[in-house]
Image: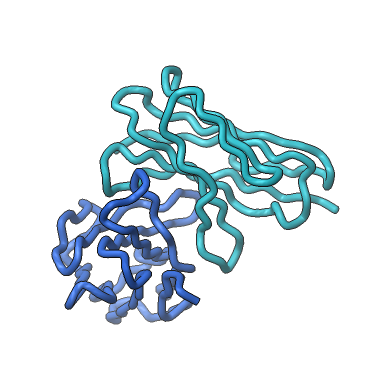
Amino acid sequence: ILNVEQSPQSLHVQEGDSTNFTCSFPSSNFYALHWYRWETAKSPEALFVMTLNGDEKKKGRISATLNTKEGYSYLYIKGSQPEDSATYLCALTPNDYKLSFGAGTTVTVRA
Amino acid sequence: DTGVSQDPRHKITKRGQNVTFRCDPISEHNRLYWYRQTLGQGPEFLTYFQNEAQLEKSRLLSDRFSAERPKGSFSTLEIQRTEQGDSAMYLCASSPRLDSYNEQFFGPGTRLTVL
């Protein structure tokens, strides 16, 4: 069982402010890391698949970085909007079929 | 909508009853996965199929749980003699065989409440 940790567990951010949060994982035998956004009553939505040390990915106002040597990834939300309110999950895939998830960071954007 | 679908979305049952959930994956995906999420935790892997073959089952999948994928299309997850500890969100996902580092596409889940 891979120990994938996310922090903080939850955060509140004012509309228009930027925020970031962390996913930590074992750095050995890294294969790929996934970020998902999960809104209430919807399906988890894939945001990024990150594979290389130093990777930076961007999708609109959301971006992510990856450091496989030290075992962490950051997700950034720039200029938070109410529609960014969701639980953000990271998942490590040590092989080609299983995802090991962290517990998620729940983001609430206050108008 | 060509995404992963799950049915039902919610299920309330009494302890000791049997329940069955269905998952319809994206049509061209031959891999299908079941995960379970309990309160405060991330989704945990239960089992996965490649076509109709069930290739791995987690230790979380006790003998009261059984999953099938006849004909390699939709899948069912059955829980017999439900217990209160089975209350959780059950998620299904699918992926193509030649995938992008195992990117999985999730359905909306079935929330099970055992009274």
User: In this image, A101 relative to A94: left or right?
Assistant: right
Q: Position of residue A78 (x, y in %)?
A: 74, 39
Q: Position of residue A41 (x, y in %)?
A: 57, 68
Name the quadrant containing residue B71: bottom left
User: In this image, B96 relative to A85: left or right?
Assistant: left
Q: Measured along the vertical axis of the image, is residue B72 above or below residue B105? A: below
Q: Residue furthest top?
A: A69
Name the quadrant containing residue A94: top left
Image coloring type:
by chain
Q: Position of residue A3 (x, y in %)?
A: 37, 34
User: In this image, B54 relative to B3: left or right?
Assistant: left
The residue lying at 41 percent from left, 53 percent from top is B43
The residue lying at 62 percent from left, 48 percent from top is A106
The residue lying at 70 percent from left, 52 percent from top is A84
| Relative depth, front residue between B19 and B100 | B100
The residue lying at 42 percent from left, 70 percent from top is B4
In this view of the protein, can residue A102 be seen by the observer? no
Q: Measured along the vertical axis of the image, is residue A26 above or below residue B93? A: above
Q: Colour of chain B?
A: blue
Q: Measured along the vertical axis of the image, is residue A16 above or below residue A26? A: below
Name the quadrant containing residue B8: bottom left
Q: Colour of chain A?
A: cyan
Q: Position of residue B40 (x, y in %)?
A: 50, 50
Quarter of the rendering occupied by the N terminus of chain A: top left
Query: What number of labels is visible?
Result: 0
User: In this image, A80 relative to B64: left or right?
Assistant: right
In this view of the protein, can residue B50 be seen by the observer? yes
